[in-house]
Image (spheres, rainbow, N blue to C red):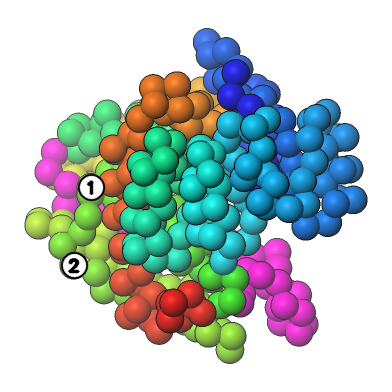
């Protein structure tokens, strides 16, 4: 059993813990919550009690050196991911870090090297690629014939945007937290594209910047040898439109590019429509937890996951460069 601690006591941490307690069908529980870290010791103690974990931390160094912890799940603000991941890896802890795990390609490369130097696993918590319905997409790409176009979109009006407009300072819309639309929900679009098609040959990006300097929404065209992927992402407007991959023989429609709720195939004559979706757990994070545990048990970083993480970081870094979204960490 892998004993893990969490950094962060928010809703996504709750969901990850629940995912480890309820593994996918036909899989035994592989991870057990052992500790909770928060800068606020009272908050950490409440969270520890709620989840019946034996250890509480309010000092990162104590967590990093604890012999009671094998692995750490990091769900702090984006701007803290790199330093916290590096500290844990350097002290021999396996790390699963929420996406985006880094704000630059160089940071991602450094974390993988630190993990390898210390014989531990570094893993970016991008859940989509581990879902049963993502495998459906992969397995049906050849059915489309030659892929010619794709439109991948994730536009969701942020619940924090009204607070931003009212003059508050939610992390989502401030560069000091390494956030914004492309780093948040746009990440899902870029990561899905890299997972399916690899690194693009060309990148062309546009964005609408807020007064703080982060992007509220934007579009990206990723060019491949004989097709292009158009990405639309937004945190200041919403859409229920499905994403679509178009080939010479047919198309795949994807409901919610992050969760892959429903996958449908249709031929180019509109005469053959099929629902391809497979059952998925209500808690989609259980699949990424399992993928993390499998790497730990195999004592090896999965090279497919590493390549996808690095390619995604490289694309997003170029998108930020073209759209002038600058973080404090860029100058370090």
Q: Can you give x and y, in whole percent of width and height, for residue 22 in the image?
A: 65, 22
In contact (CB < 8 Å): disc 1 and disc 2: no
Circle 1 crowding by C-alpha within 10 Å: few under 14, some 14–19, many from 20: few
- Label count reads 2
Q: Residues within 10 Å of mark 2 (few under 14, many from 20)?
A: few
C-alpha span from label 1 to label 2: 13 Å
In magenta segment, residue 318: no
- Residue nearer the viewer, 33 or 202: 33
Q: Quadrant of residue 305?
A: top left
Residue matched to label 2: 202
Q: Check the image and report above or below for 213 versus 229.
A: below
What is the span of residues highlighted in magenta in the rendered image?
Answer: 145-174
The residue located at (37%, 56%) in the rendering is 110
Using the rendered image of the protein, determine whether residue 141 is visible from the camera's viewpoint: yes
Q: Position of residue 251 (x, y in %)?
A: 27, 42
- Frontmost residue, 167 versus 2: 2
- The mark found on residue 197 in the picture is 1
Left/right placement of residue 164 relative to residue 90 reads right
């Amino acid at each position: 059993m892998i004993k893990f601690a969490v950094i962060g006591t928010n809703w996504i941490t709750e969901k990850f813990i629940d995912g480890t307690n309820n593994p996918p069908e036909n899989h035994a529980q592989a991870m057990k919550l052992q500790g909770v870290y928060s800068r606020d010791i009272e908050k950490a103690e409440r969270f520890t009690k709620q989840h019946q974990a034996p250890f509480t931390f309010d000092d990162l160094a104590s967590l990093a050196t604890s012999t009671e912890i094998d692995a750490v799940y990091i769900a702090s603000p984006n701007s803290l991911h790199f330093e916290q991941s590096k500290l844990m890896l350097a002290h021999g802890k396996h790390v699963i870090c929420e996406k985006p795990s880094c704000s630059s390609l160089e940071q991602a490369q450094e974390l993988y090297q630190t993990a390898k130097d210390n014989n531990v696993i570094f893993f970016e918590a991008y859940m989509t690629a581990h879902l049963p319905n993502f495998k459906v997409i992969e397995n049906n790409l050849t059915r489309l014939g030659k892929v010619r176009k794709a439109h991948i979109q994730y536009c969701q009006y942020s619940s924090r945007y009204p607070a931003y407009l009212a003059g508050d300072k939610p992390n989502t819309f401030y560069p000091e937290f390494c956030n914004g639309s492309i780093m948040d929900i746009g990440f899902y679009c870029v990561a899905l594209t890299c997972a399916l098609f690899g690194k693009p040959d060309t990148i062309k990006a546009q964005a609408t910047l807020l007064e703080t300097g982060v992007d509220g929404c934007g579009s990206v065209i990723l060019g491949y040898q004989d097709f292009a992927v158009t990405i639309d992402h937004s945190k200041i407007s919403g859409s229920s439109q499905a994403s679509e991959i178009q080939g010479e023989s047919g198309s795949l429609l994807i409901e919610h590019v992050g969760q892959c709720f429903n996958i449908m195939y249709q031929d180019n004559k509109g005469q053959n429509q099929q629902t391809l979706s497979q059952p998925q757990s209500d808690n989609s994070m259980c699949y990424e937890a399992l993928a993390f545990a499998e790497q730990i048990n195999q004592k090896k970083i999965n090279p497919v996951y590493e390549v996808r993480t690095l390619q995604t970081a490289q694309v997003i870094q170029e998108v930020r460069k073209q759209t002038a979204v600058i973080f404090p960490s860029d100058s370090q």
